[in-house]
Amino acid sequence: MSKPLVVIGSGGHASVIADILLNQGRTIVATVSPDEIKDNIPLKGIKRLMTDASLLDTYSPEEVDLVNGLGALPGNTLRTNLFDYFSNYGYKFQSVIAPSAIIAGGVRLEDGVQVMHGAIIQTNASISKNCIVNSGSVVEHDCVIGAHNHIAPNATLSGGVITGDQVHIGTGANVIQSISIGKRAVIGAGCTIIRDVKAGQVIVPARNRVIREES
């Protein structure tokens, strides 16, 4: 039987996650948020814990599972740090799979993976812990995605792409087949990647130019 859930965070990503979970009939017993819960989000009315310490004091790892409701921004390690912090105390992070996501046979998902609405993960792909495969993104066959990655909305990874840990692939980016992307690399929104990317590199598309401006 599934344990009750505690969602860490109360921002936009946490709201989307909570909406998916509640529509699937999952029980959310609390959220961890230093900020007041907004009136217009699904977490409104759910018990609020203000600090990480409050979670440790209120629920044991045997009582609840956790859901990482923090979003992932390039260079921001808070989502990763929280996952590691609570994992070290013995808590398990549940994966979240939107009902409209398509996950083929042979796909491997580790703890805490979140696959959002309209995402597609093809056969024999492997997604490591605490990754976000965001709305409308495509991870093709035989990709190997490292821990704590964010595949942003509408990004496409062709077959056999390999990424290191803490990689961010921006909105609408495209990575051709068999590319390797090193740990902590950032692929900017709209980029097309046709060669390997070294660890820590930040790749951005050419700067937009104004060709003509109406007076």
Image (cartoon, grey):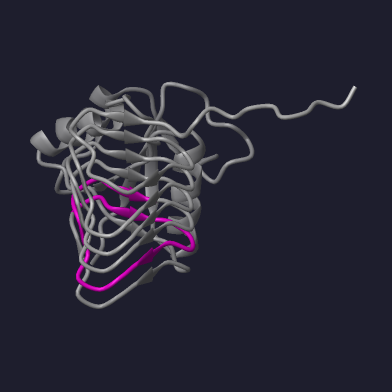
Farthest residue, direction bottom: 105
- Asked if residue 72 lies in the magenta stretch, the reply is no
- Percent position (x, y) of residue 86? 17, 34
User: For residue 213, which quarter of the picture?
Assistant: top right
Query: Quarter holding the C terminus?
Result: top right
User: Residue at coordinates 52% horizontally, 25% vertically from top-left?
Assistant: 36
Farthest residue, direction front: 211
Question: Does residue 89 appear in the picture of this structure?
Answer: no
- Percent position (x, y) of residue 211? 71, 29
- Percent position (x, y) of residue 19? 50, 53
Foreground residue among 37 and 69? 69
Q: Is residue 45 left or right of residue 211?
A: left
Farthest residue, direction right: 215
Foreground residue among 209 and 72? 209
User: For residue 31, which quarter of the picture?
Assistant: top left
Give the magenta range: 111-133
- Percent position (x, y) of residue 128? 18, 51
Question: Does residue 27 appear in the picture of this structure?
Answer: yes
